[in-house]
């Protein structure tokens, strides 16, 4: 009973909390936040990386499907980030000019096998000449198909205005024509042109030709993620062969992966507009945008998961098969830093980089791919 003598007054008495109790609650909340938030950040980053990888896989597969459906090359353009030329955060479909059958309706090709044995990449070199007309508007890297069927021959040179040097890979089959060192009978042909764009050189301000992006279809990667072009791997044996990056080259031109109407990769355009056909699968490293400004190759022994996407185990590889265009996703593998594997003291920096790349991409060469990613 309270001092008023009324027992009913007890239920109206308010119970509060003391300042000490309030401070204890605040301390508990702050402590839990300090423990939980840092643990959530990597999870959020990993989800964004996986979201980026899924988007890239779908976008690339869409380009391949479109090339097969339309019967003409389609490119995937990896736009370089203006502030960091080794990162790409936006992908476009590249526009392709219509096919050409030469300058005249009656233009036909005669073919001659330049060598009866293939080169080290398994490709045959074929000479071609036009009976009438020429090839105005065609460029190195364009694809030639004979009689609207069979293989696609890649143009590698224009010896004259009316002649071509072609290369073709039979991919286990026989060449479609009985090519011999003598000239064949004239055959009809189509030239499938590679993507074209207009590009302003950041150093000189001059305008040159390149690849045109389709503004209507774009894939913007999630915030904080990027394709690391410096570490994305092309088949090859040296650092010059395997990177898509811009180390020491002030060139803002995009990387373009071009699919042929057969579904495989017909060519890749990299720094300074160089175009070539890959001899193996292409691996794109999907990682963090803030880790793409790579330390110098001479400092490779100091690279780690804090400054390099190559050593970040949360990152993913998108692998594109060069022969059929199929796309898969694999985890980034750990790089063994123990002596000799791969960083033997006798190794040069380029050799260390190549070996590190081979180690990091080893899951792309076995069955450890991520289905549905």
Image (cartoon, rainbow, N blue to C red):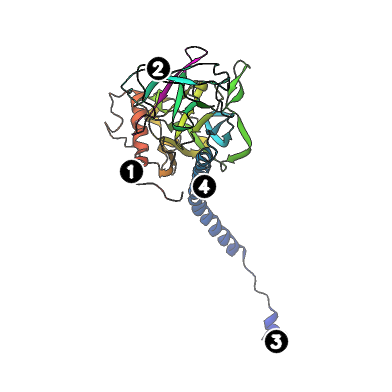
> Which span is picked out in magenta?
157-176
- Is residue 245 visible in this depiction of the protein? no
Q: Between tags 2 and 4, which lies in front? A: 2
Q: Residue furthest top?
A: 160
Mark toward the start of the polypeptide (3 vs 4)? 3
Please name whichever residue, 157 or 35, is drawn nearer the observer in this view of the structure. Answer: 157
Residue at 53%, 59% (x, y): give it: 28
Is 169 contained in the magenta span?
A: yes
x then y, percent, for residue 139: 53, 20
Q: What residue is pinned by disc 1?
A: 366
Residue at 52%, 30% (x, y): give it: 256
CB within 8 Å, label 2 to label 1:
no
The main secondary structure of the magenta stretch is loop
- The residues bearing labels 3 and 1 have C-alpha atoms spaced at a distance of 79 Å
Residue 8 is marked as 3
- The residues bearing labels 3 and 4 have C-alpha atoms spaced at a distance of 63 Å
- The residues bearing labels 2 and 1 have C-alpha atoms spaced at a distance of 45 Å
- The residues bearing labels 3 and 2 have C-alpha atoms spaced at a distance of 116 Å
Is 347 contained in the magenta span?
A: no
Disc 4 element = helix
Disc 2 element = loop
- Is residue 337 visible in this depiction of the protein? yes
Q: What residue is pinned by disc 2?
A: 183
x then y, percent, for residue 370: 41, 48
x then y, percent, for residue 42: 48, 47
């Amino acid at each position: 009973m309270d001092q008023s003598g009324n027992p009913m007054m007890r239920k109206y008495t308010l119970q509060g909390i003391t300042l000490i109790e309030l401070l204890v609650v605040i301390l508990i909340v702050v402590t839990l936040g300090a423990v939980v938030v840092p643990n959530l950040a990597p999870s959020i980053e990993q989800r964004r990386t996986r979201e980026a990888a899924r988007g890239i896989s779908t976008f690339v597969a869409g380009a391949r499907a479109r090339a097969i459906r339309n019967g003409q090359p389609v490119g995937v353009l990896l736009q370089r980030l203006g502030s960091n030329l080794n990162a790409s955060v936006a992908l476009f479909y590249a526009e392709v000019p219509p096919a050409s059958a030469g300058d005249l309706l009656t233009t036909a090709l005669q073919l001659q096998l330049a060598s009866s044995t293939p080169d080290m990449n398994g490709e045959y070199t074929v000479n071609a000449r036009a009976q009438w007309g020429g090839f105005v508007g065609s460029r190195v890297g364009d694809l030639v198909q004979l009689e609207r069927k069979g293989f696609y021959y890649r143009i590698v040179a224009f010896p004259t205005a009316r002649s071509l040097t072609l290369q073709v890979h039979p991919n286990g089959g026989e060449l479609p024509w009985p090519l011999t060192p003598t000239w064949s009978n004239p055959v009809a042909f189509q030239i499938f042109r590679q993507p074209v764009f207009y590009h302003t050189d950041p150093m000189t301000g001059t305008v040159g030709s390149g690849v045109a992006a389709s503004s209507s279809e774009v894939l913007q990667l999630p915030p904080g993620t990027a394709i690391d072009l410096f570490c994305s791997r092309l088949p090859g044996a040296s650092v010059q062969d395997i990177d898509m990056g811009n180390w020491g080259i002030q060139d803002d031109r995009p990387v373009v992966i071009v699919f042929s109407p057969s579904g495989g990769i017909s060519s890749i355009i990299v720094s300074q507009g160089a175009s070539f056909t890959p001899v193996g699968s292409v691996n794109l490293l999907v990682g963090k945008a803030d880790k793409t400004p790579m330390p110098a190759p001479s400092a490779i022994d100091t690279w780690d998961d804090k400054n390099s996407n190559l050593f970040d185990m949360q990152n993913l590889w998108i692998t594109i098969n060069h022969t059929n265009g199929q796309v898969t996703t694999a985890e980034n593998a750990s790089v063994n830093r123990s002596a000799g594997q791969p960083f033997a003291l006798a190794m040069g920096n380029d050799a260390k980089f190549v070996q590190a790349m081979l180690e990091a991409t080893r899951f792309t060469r076995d069955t450890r791919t991520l289905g549905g990613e």
